[in-house]
Image (spheres, rainbow, N blue to C red):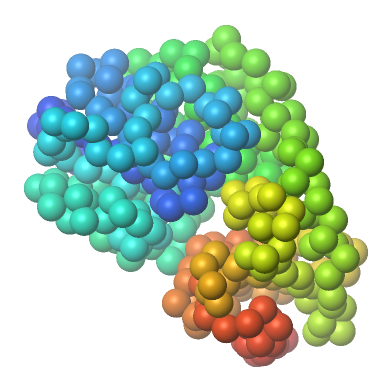
Amino acid sequence: MSTFNEIRTLIEMSDVIAISGHTSPDGDAIGSCCALAMALKELGKETAVIIDEFPDVFHIIPTGGLLYHSLPEGFAPDLYIALDCGDIERLGKNKELFSQVPNTINIDHHRSNTEFGKLNYVDEDASSTSEIVFKLLYGYAPFNNDIASALYTGIIYDTGGFRHSSTTPATMAIAAELMEYDFNFSDIYNKVFFTRKIGEAKALGLAMERLETCLNGKGVYTYITLEDMKRLGVGSDDLHEITGFIKGIEGCEVSAFVYEKTPDAFKVSMRSDESFDVCKICGAFGGGGHIRAAGCTVEGNPMDIVEKVFKEAEKQL
């Protein structure tokens, strides 16, 4: 694994730096990308965050005017930094540009990371990529209120508001340090976790209606189709709350939320406690992530996919 000093040296040697997170970006991907971009701008670098569209709830994250949904005209990076991506495929439409740039850095906290950059820093013990970016920048680049706000949002999102087992004393110390800056941390927390559109609430209700158990009550699952989303007027970005919600069902040790991304191709989002390694389960279907939180994409119909996934889970009993 590369060191922070090696990463900083490569940054210093570069003038134009592109930064991207994974497709269907979440709070950690957006927060870490925007925080790093704003910090590098403070260091005199020309930077741009190139990232997909994302749910409205994450518009609370400061961008410094550096966020784009496609490559800015005339922007020719000599360094590309991928954040929160387990493999190059997770960069989506940006993977081709990433492959063409002379120098690349991959910073992530997913156990299944393939180390696809020229330099790679992967810490699976970190709560979030935002936590790693804080450590990279600390004592190296100036912080300001917007950088602190972006990193705080990324950390609280990926820790589920400090509820997930990935939360460590170091995570809490970093959050406390960020809260010394002038931003409304309680407003961010409430918007990320407790604000939802009517369509999101209806989708959650439908998912709860379909909720079923398996593995003698240890497994819980539900699903949403494209037809459902069309009827409810929602997109896949409006379903992010369901995964964590069903894991909270009493007696559940492993959960799977299955939703249709494209016709007959379903994303499986899994959560577990210490009884199951969902990274290993999803890895059997070409996916990955963390021991307690992972995902994969499987073709077929939802009930067949559920059966296959929980047969794989059953091997761990």
Judge whether 117 appears above or below 40 on screen: below
Total marks in image: 0
Q: Nearer the viewer, residue 81 or 125?
A: 81
* Residue located at (61% from left, 40% from top): 157
Residue 241 in sight here: no
Q: Quadrant of the C terminus?
A: bottom right
Left-right relation of 157 to 99 = right
Q: Is 306 drawn above or below residue 129 in the view shown?
A: below
Q: Position of residue 130 (x, y in %)?
A: 47, 38
| Residue furthest front as drawn | 231
Q: Is residue 294 left or right of residue 317?
A: left
On screen, 266 above or below 67? below
The residue depicted at 84 percent of the width and 75 percent of the height is 212
Name the spot of residue 61 as percent of width and height, x first: 53, 27
Find residue 192 and report its horizontal and vertical position in percent. 67, 35
The residue drawn where x is 63% and y is 44% is: 159
Q: Residue at x 66, y 87 (%)?
A: 304
Q: Position of residue 286 (x, y in %)?
A: 45, 77
- Single out the residue that lies furthest toward the top: 182
Residue 206 is at least partly visible in this image? yes
In front here: 142 or 271? 271
Q: Quadrant of the N terminus?
A: bottom left
- Left or right of residue 6, residue 82 in this image: right
Give the image quarter of residue 172: top right
